[in-house]
Image (cartoon, rainbow, N blue to C red):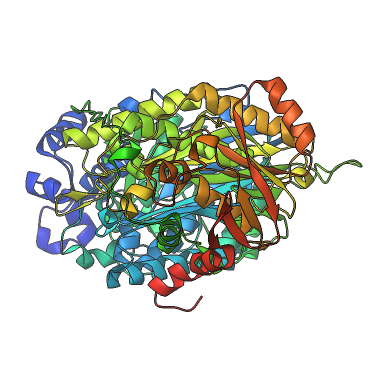
Amino acid sequence: MMKTLNEDLYNINENEYLAQQESTLEEALEMGLTEDEFNLICTKIKKKPNKTELGIFSAMFSEHCSYKSSKKWLKTLPTKANHVIQGPGENAGVIDIGNDLAAVFKIESHNHPSFIEPYQGAATGVGGILRDVFTMGARPIALLNALRFGSPTQPLTKHLVSGVVKGIGGYGNCIGIPTVGGETNFNQSYDGNILVNAMAVGLANKHRIFYSAATGSGNPVIYVGAKTGRDGIHGATMASTEFTENSSEKRPTVQVGDPFTGKLLLEACLELMSTDAVLSIQDMGAAGLTSSSVEMASKGSLGMHLNLDLVPTREEKMTSYEIMLSESQERMLMILKPGSEEKAKMIFDKWDLDFAVIGEVTKTGRLILDKDGFEACNIPINPLVEDAPEYDRPYKIIQNKKIIKPNELNINETINEILTKMFKNPNIASKRWIWEQYDSSVMGDTISSNSKSDAAIVKIHGTESTKSLGKGIAMTTDCTPRYVKSDPINGGMQAVCEAARNIAASGAKPMAITNNLNFGNPEKLNIMGEIVGSIKGISKAASFLNTPIVSGNVSLYNETNGKGILPTPVIGMVGVIDEVENCLEMNAQDDNTLIVLGQSENLIEGWIGCSVYQEITNNKIDTAPPPVYLENEKKIIDILLKLNNKKLLTAAHDISDGGLLTTTCEMLFKNNLGLSINLPKSLFKCDSKDPTLHSWCFGEDQGRIIVATDKIDDVESFLEDSNIDYFILGKTNSSNNLNLNDMTIISINDIKKLNNQTLPSLMGEQS
């Protein structure tokens, strides 16, 4: 029988005290709520909430959980296509890839925690995204990441890079999932706010996808996994606020990961899912037991009644507030078929994991929590989710229209000197020092990763035939923040298109997107404009390329002392290749002809605005980024895939940061090749400091891919019939020199050495 609340506060325990005490506005403000939001809560629940109830509202109303500043615009994204099984709104997105199989994938941020505690922040980011995938019934097959750090010369940056990389490797390597790709960039805007975006991809039977909506009044609610501790309390709220110089004091809000328990949980959940016991399942991620219980109940239009005394805890005398707001890792919430509890418990006992029946689904539409024999919480579900705030914030989209021409460039260096600078730039140089700390081959299915191709490819078991090794999944992450800063709409389109080009350059067809939208304070006009503009651009490009957005994450308030990051809407894209033996690498072979698809011989003035070239030569950077032509992007991708299906190509590499000459060098590195580049006729007489020659070599015009072939006649014939612009760059050789016409520019070995040594040198380590 429920206890009557004692009026004498001196004679009651802490939990009873928390239940009796009405929260104040001051407490609400401390938890990150606004005065209007506090008043809304009081109106919706017809009382002032107690501390536990207030904590639950503060977590669910946080940007991290509610997307209150962005969901108006997220609703405009294209999310449907014939191959989409599940779009946004679940733990992960799901697409049909044929053979009765589904690809399950998502990307999510762990930015603030990784800045405060880089190892655990990154590790738990990996653990969390893996749980999102296997919660859907999929076995994870690959991990990727998109990382952004501040100036590499700063001691703090070196500390953060080291911790994050070790955290990603420590969790992924231990749990046995290969880390196959990603991107790492440096910019001083991230000095106070690094970005750690983790992506996971899994495979499932398309007829055995599991969802999170609670079902069946009276069905048991099950807690499984690790015990609940005090780590990570109010992590979601912390991730929804700006940093200050005192942010290091927030270390207790960072969760602690355990990859070994994570592996046990993965296997136990998948084993139980192979039975008919699981009705619904939800990862305990941000906001822990709060978000998992509330979201499950909301999606099922039901309620939930939980007894918190039954929750396994690893610390004594935890309050209802602490249990509900803890973000301890490796935990799941399930709804099981009545009568299957013992069967399920046996499985989790076998894997040495906690298993507890902690409550039941109800028809009440309310979240009711008991603790120590009294009612600790009794609030309606709808105000927490369906009626949560949705803001239509004012915005201003700033688009830089200034176009810089070659004759405006201040040229003091030769092509040779510029190339040297390029590969000394940490954003261009090899990230081998980072990805060699990850296990990319565990499970034995990785076909291509990291330096081998523009996108990683993992083999799909069960799709083999007498004629083929079977299908593969291609995956990549991409974003060019400086483009988004200069022109948010164009930058959003470019991020999608570059991801699609990278998928195609690996030999795969682009299929669908998961995105991670990282921005500063949305209450500022220009930053909200960056959010709106980039979503508009992403939407336009994704619609045109038929690559719908099926999952994602929004991370806002990435600011320190009022200084925001570069807008960074990361695109994670997945594609499918029908025959993995037909995948493309970026590494050219000897005696290959290199062809630039998407560029005519008449294009001699490259787009130098907003480029790496501008940055490293100290030319102005407040210029317009290269325009994106969607028709051309689609055409290039289609033709590239047709050429590859005809087995006419030996390699392909997307032209992006650093322009044509930088991309060419990267294709020559592995096999120590040389190349004599055939310049357009109008550039024959240019010397090595000519501005037009520089813009041609280093301009970042979009919609271009360099392909390599040993069947030039067949390729040219096909290209002529396809009515596409192309330019024959030259034929590779064993000289190891890069030449422009008859002028030797530089030794490829010298550039390759710089490429490999730059990042280790900056991080204070040997290559």
**Picture residue at 73% right of the left edge, 37% below the top:** 644
Q: Nearer the viewer, residue 25 or 730?
A: 730
Q: Nearer the viewer, residue 601 or 594?
A: 601
**Picture residue at 20% right of the left edge, 61% below the top:** 14
Q: Which of 542 and 357 is in front in this view?
A: 542
Tell me where residue 26 appears, x and y as whole percent.
Answer: 7, 48
Image: 443 above or below 648: below
Q: Which of 367 and 201 is in front in this view?
A: 201
| Lateral position of residue 324 relative to residue 751, left or right | left
Image: 81 above or below 461: above
Tell me where residue 462 appears, x and y as whole percent.
Answer: 80, 44
Q: How many badges with numbers are in the image?
A: 0
**Picture residue at 42% right of the left edge, 64% below the top:** 424
| Lateral position of residue 123 relative to residue 470, left or right | left
Tell me where residue 50 appears, x and y as whole percent.
Answer: 18, 46
| Lateral position of residue 285 relative to residue 180, left or right | left
Quadrant of residue 85 in the image? top right
